[in-house]
Image (cartoon, rainbow, N blue to C red):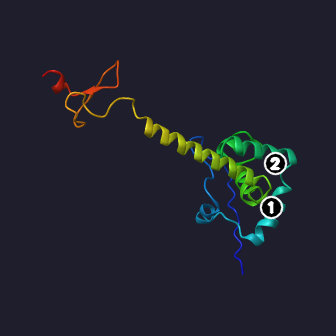
Amino acid sequence: EDEVLEAPVATASPKSDDLVSIDGDDEEDEDDGLQLSQNSSSAAARRNNSLWTASERELFHRLIIEHKKNLQQVNRNMPEKNMGDILQYYLASYKSSRNYPQLKVVMTEERERKERLEEEELLKGDGNDDYCALCDDGGGELLCCEFCPRVYHIECMVK
């Protein structure tokens, strides 16, 4: 038999400096103990969906995509809902909705964009050479020329 797990319900909003976001795949949700069993999720989704108007569900979808799964930001833009409402709706209803695949695509594109930027930064470097222009050694402290990509050791410049 499947064990029925209830989604936790928060009674107070998190502190403003706390970051609440749900990142990663379903496996991470299971690791955190937040994944609902398949048997209970559809009943919970129907129950939770009835508490949300169509316009609130549409707003939630727009906000969760805009804020890249940052539930704290979603909650700030939906003051009539508390964090427990937001989290419960996400886990019990939204993840099984037809909108969820769109969020997965957005999050995948965002992760790939960040990886590309990090790779470009690593490849770009600082624009200067890595070795002294006079002794061809890259060790020690190197001074960068302000007018070209060359770098020099102070010792090499005073010889």
- Using the image, tell me which numbered label, if any, was put on residue 149: none
The residue positioned 84% from the left and 61% from the top of the image is 46
In the image, is 30 to the left or to the right of 133?
Answer: right
**Residue 121, percent across and down?**
46, 37
**Residue 14, percent across and down?**
62, 47
The residue positioned 60% from the left and 40% from the top of the image is 16
**Residue 132, percent across and down?**
24, 30
The residue positioned 18% from the left and 22% from the top of the image is 157
| Quadrant of the snapshot with the N terminus | bottom right
- The answer to which of 30 and 104 lies nearer the viewer is 104
Q: Sequence order check: which comes first, mark 1 or mark 2? A: 1
Q: In the image, what residue type sits under mark 2?
A: Arg
Q: Is residue 146 visible?
A: yes
User: Circle 2 is placed at which residue position?
Assistant: 57
In the image, is 152 to the left or to the right of 71?
Answer: left
User: Circle 1 is placed at which residue position?
Assistant: 45
How many neighbours does mark 1 have within 10 angstroms: few (below 14), some (14-19), or many (20 or more)? many
Q: Do residues under tags 1 and 2 come within 8 Å of each other at their CB atoms?
A: no
Helix, strand or loop at label 2? It is helix
